[in-house]
Image: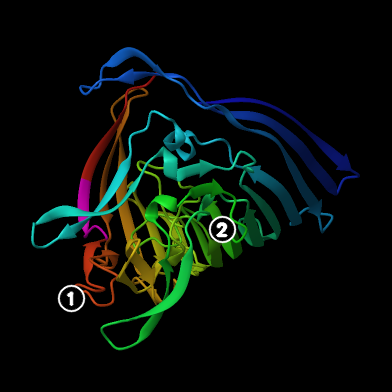
Amino acid sequence: MFVTAAAFASDAVTVGDRLTINAGIRFDHSRAISEDLRAIDAEGHETREIVRGLGTLYTWNLLSPRLGVTAKITGDARTMLRGSYGRFNQGVLTGEFSGFHPGVTPVTTAAFEAATGGYTRVVKVVDAGNLQLDRNLRAPHTDEYSIGVDREVGRRLAVAIAYVRKDGANFIGWTDIGGQYRQETRSLPDGQSVPVLVLTNSTADRRFLLTNPADYSLTYDGLVTAVEKRRSHGWQAFGSYTYSRATGLQPSSGATAAASQVSTISGTPFLTFGQDPNTLTNARGLMPNDRPHMLRFMGTVDIPHTGLTLAGNAQHFSGKPWAASTQIVLPQGDQRILLETRGTRRLSSQTLVDLRLSRPVSLGGSRRAELFVDVLNVLNDTAEESLANDNLFSPTFGQPTAFVDPRRAMFGVRLNLGR
């Protein structure tokens, strides 16, 4: 469990009639605790036996400053400059240290064997004796900066441009401090060689330390442009384009194309990325959610003399990055190793267009209904969202297995029965 107490203060200061400064600071005191628990029997029922926890594992005292500035560039306030800075600290996640409790049973990883038709080949067994926790663990944090300009063009048209940067550090991950490794090479089926790190001592000697690896980081750079036409003459519209890049090294850096981007090893079971140094090969690079191009458009228009309103939402964005891998048998067990840096390959870009046609109907008094029909994925985009295998030497390498939902229509009624 964790116990947290927090306090914050903020204020806004206006300098003349053109500059406003918003400043704030937050303080968090958090303790990560491995508490005493009742043991359970084979059926999952609590017994009278007490399994002693490890007590307080670590304590964080964190300051998170915030600063925002808004300035009028022109006296009529139609051109505004906005800037901000903020530090965002991760709170305690129980999933990151629950596996260290003395009551946790060993976790066995097994591989599939064709001869038996099941996962019968034991790759590794990890119990509390193999795990160590850095009691000086630091809280992951992200520093976020932004600066932008907003401009009103006419009475109902506004444009904006903004630059956003995020720098993350102190991410929590695994490293092996007990295993001793020798660099060797292994030949692949296509004849090329790949460098590997081979365990030279016993697997029982491995000690997986949960700490703040020095090379874990995250950097995001994004440039956003937007145009908004406010509602008038029966229509409104909003459009934006974002060019961005997200790079770094995190626990999800070795994930497959369909996996989500996460910055924690928390899970059931733990994410084990980093426990074997071979998982770090080619792992630094584009993050799983890197999408360099994102274009969005939304709008509504009233169809004259019909009472009908047509609304649309269109999005186009780059596919997620991925890389080819291979599976290599090593003394410490089978290891999945990236042969390329993430981003060498990408899933297909997606273009999604959704439309809604609606009409309100009065039911008397303050009651009314709205009839609508939604048509989703109008263009019937068939972009893939996951792959059967990223193993370069698998017969199903790069074959798509899941796709965006196909074109579909939904009819609905919304009732407003008054107060």
Query: For residue 406: magenta?
Result: yes
Snapshot quadrant of residue 101: top left
Task: For marks 2 and 1, give the one nearer the viewer.
Answer: 1
- Magenta span of residues: 404-410
Looking at the rendered structure, the kind of residue marked 2 is Glu
Q: Residue at x 62, y 51 (%)?
A: 170
Residue annotated with mark 1: 395
Amino acid type shown at disc 1: Pro
First-in-chain label (2 vs 1): 2
Closer to the camera, 159 or 280?
A: 280
Q: Is residue 248 visible?
A: yes
Disc sitting over residue 264 in the figure? none
> Callout 1: few (<14), some (14-19), or many (20+) C-alpha neighbours within 10 Å?
few
Which label belongs to residue 228? 2
Residue 419 is left or right of residue 225, and the answer is: left
* Residue located 40% across and 66% down the image: 320
Residue 146 against residue 316 in the figure, above or below: above
Q: Position of residue 412 (x, y in %)?
A: 23, 40
Secondary element under disc 1, as helix, strand or loop, is loop
Q: Nearer the viewer, residue 328 or 292?
A: 328
Left or right of residue 270: residue 59: right
Q: Of helix, strand and loop, which one carries label 2?
A: strand
Relative height, residue 107 to residue 294 (above, below): above
Q: Is residue 82 part of the magenta span, yes or no? A: no
